[in-house]
Image: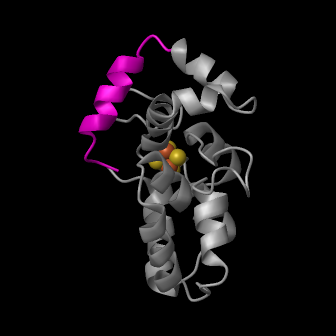
Amino acid sequence: MVAKCLSSTVDGVRDRGWVHHIPRLMILGNFALQHAWDPRALTDWFATAFVDGFAWVMPVNVIGMSQHADGGVIATKPYASGGAYLNRMTDYCKPCEFNPKKRLGDDACPFTAGYWAFVHRHREMLALNHRTARQVSSMNRLSDLEQVLEQERQREVY
Ligand code: SF4
């Protein structure tokens, strides 16, 4: 199985050295955030992989806006989202083998399940932010949370 959003976006970077700001943030940045990638290493990757990866703009865009690794100076909440949001904002989900509505199972969307794993990992910090506290409450009501977390710990297919 292949995450259509991720593969199409990575293909775009490989073939053109460029994708629009939204896939950079919503797909590449979101994926890195969900998987706790190192913000400095990610900034270096964006700076070298993109034709417009100017050194003066990448730290603000990647560390601040995309990864929320500046302590919230640029953005008031982390730019993390699940498959439902990607489905609303892009055309990738319809032809995708994963299901953006599913968080558990073979066709569970890695962004949807990954989102809940992200919220769980940062639950204490997110609960203190009035813009994200509700997501922590929603996570606490998920009856299958432990299974979702275990699934994402084991995930090898994206
Ligand atoms: S279903 Fe999930 S993995 Fe597939 S395109 Fe949509 S957001 Fe991406």
Residue at 59% from the left image edge and 45% from the top image edge: 80
In this rendered view, identify the residue nearer to me: 9 or 138: 138
Q: Quadrant of residue 113?
A: top left
In this rendered view, identify the residue nearer to me: 17 or 92: 17
Count the labels in the image.
0
User: Residue 149 in magenta?
Assistant: yes
Residue at 68% from the left image edge and 31% from the top image edge: 132
Residue at 51% from the left image edge and 76% from the top image edge: 46
x then y, percent, for residue 111:
48, 43
- Residue 40 in the image: above or below residue 33: below
Residue at 61% from the left image edge and 87% from the top image edge: 54
Residue stretch rendered in magenta on the structure: 142-158
In this rendered view, identify the residue nearer to me: 101 or 82: 82
Question: Is residue 18 shown to the viewer in this render?
Answer: yes
Colour mode?
one colour
User: Residue 145 in magenta?
Assistant: yes
Q: Is residue 47 left or right of residue 146?
A: right
x then y, percent, for residue 3:
42, 52
Q: Is residue 46 left or right of residue 24?
A: left
Question: Is residue 95 shown to the viewer in this render?
Answer: no
Q: Quadrant of residue 84?
A: top right
x then y, percent, for residue 28:
51, 61
x then y, percent, for residue 83:
55, 41
